[in-house]
Amino acid sequence: MRSILIIGAGRSASSLIRYLLSKAIEEKLHLIIADISLEQAQKKAKNHSNATPIALDIFDEVQRHQAIKKASIVVSMLPAHLHIQVARDCLTYGKNLVTASYVNDAMLLLNEEVKAKGLIFMNEIGLDPGIDHMSAMKVIDEIRESGGKMLLFESFCGGLVAPESDSNLWNYKFTWSPRNVVLAGQGGAAKFIQEGTYKYIPYNNLFKRTEFLQVEDYGRFEAYPNRDSLKYRSVYGLDHALTLYRGTIRRVGFSKAWNMFVQLGMTDDSYIMENSQTMSYREFINSFLPYHPTDSVEIKMRLILKIDPDDIMWDKLVELDLFNATKIIGLENATPAQILEKILSDSWTLQPEDKDMIVMYHKFGYEKEGVRTQIDSKMVCIGEDQTFTAMAKTVGLPVAIATLLILNKKITTTGVQLPITKEVYLPILKELEEYGVFFSEQKAPYYGYNPDVVFK
């Protein structure tokens, strides 16, 4: 019996655990499901004969060592900053490791030791990062192998609410970390390259610059640029590509509305607001508006944002109940961003009957024998329910499939790595199709960047 230690039994682990349990008897697997909450681990184990739930405090060195030492392979579904200690223990005890998180410098420093011990530390094998890498490299490799030269690569991904559960004017609900949504784009200018020219968009202008995308059967979307689109330029072998852009997908109109919060300063996480615990929603809004002896908060808000009472932007603000004088924030020593997150969570939390949706969209521009072609590759995944969400499915399934492939010695390349080689992406993408996660591709002539068509 081969033992898989899964550390972290949160929402993103649901589909991961279900997949491995479905293979447990056939593949002779025993899952040790470890979480700080034993109850959480027990829920995920579902009394399966091949699963043992345990309580594990990741900061308890003795507990952690005992669990890792007994495992055949370790899957860490912890927050990204906690992976490194697990990784060091895996190195000590000679265990392969799988995570869905970005590789950081500390993890990269282990690469030579990991290789020397003949181990595999597979990272960035979730959705984004993960499925984005694999689906992109598959097409890029096919283009190169056919003699094509890459000119353009654009990649977009978004966690959204499914059309049947889209019930507010923002066409958005939180499907993942609300805090990450509120803080998106902060920490430096967005950077990308377009037709050979480096472009930079500071945070205060980020949500004014969107690219529009059309997805068959699902309508029109928009995307704002990620902070660093060039992070994977060399990793993908695109150093000579003229255009490289990565973005986050939302429904059309979201960015323009979100920009109102940015311009007012409500997404700032750098300082604490006085009396935040007793402050009302209305007082919070008024804190960012100029004083006037007679004008109401509503009038001041419309004046500073330059919006009319019949503007849809105003309706979106009203829908959030921002001007309520009786609703209390109730957060002690909170930053503007934390307060905004609290307010939005009132309106944007998925309800029990709601379903989420993942949309991923790649554009590949290339030249072959003097002919320029563009390939558009699109994937849409709808969640089942609040446990097996589209997000949990697209994050957890690649992790699970990779874990089994490593156990079965189908993935053998050692070291700290990303899923960008055929050995990894071909079998995983093929199996994902069986679970409804697949890309449709369309070809069209590629004419290069047209600012009148692409960016508004």
Image (cartoon, rainbow, N blue to C red):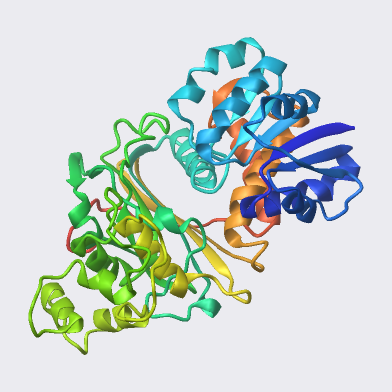
Position of residue 381 relative to residue 45, above or below, is: below
Task: Name the side, left or right, on which 404 lies relative to 365.
Answer: right
**Residue 214 appears in the figure:** no
Give the image location of residue 81, x and y in percent: 50, 35
Residue at point 67% right, 22% down?
Answer: 90
Residue sitting at the far bottom: 310
Task: Name the side, left or right, on which 421 lies relative to 156.
Answer: right
Give the image location of residue 177, x and y in percent: 48, 55
Give the image location of residue 208, x and y in percent: 21, 62
Give the image location of residue 204, x and y in percent: 19, 55
Residue sitting at the far left: 293
**Residue 142 appears in the figure:** yes
- Number of marks drawn: 0
Position of residue 311 relative to residue 335, above or below, is: below
Residue at point 54% right, 77% down?
Answer: 165
Position of residue 200 relative to residue 171, above or below, is: above
The quarter holding residue 267 reads bottom left
The foreground one among 15 and 83 is 83
Task: Name the side, left or right, on which 94 lies relative to 346.
Answer: right
* Quarter of the image that includes the N terminus: top right
* Quarter of the image that includes the C terminus: bottom left
The foreground one among 272 and 159 is 272
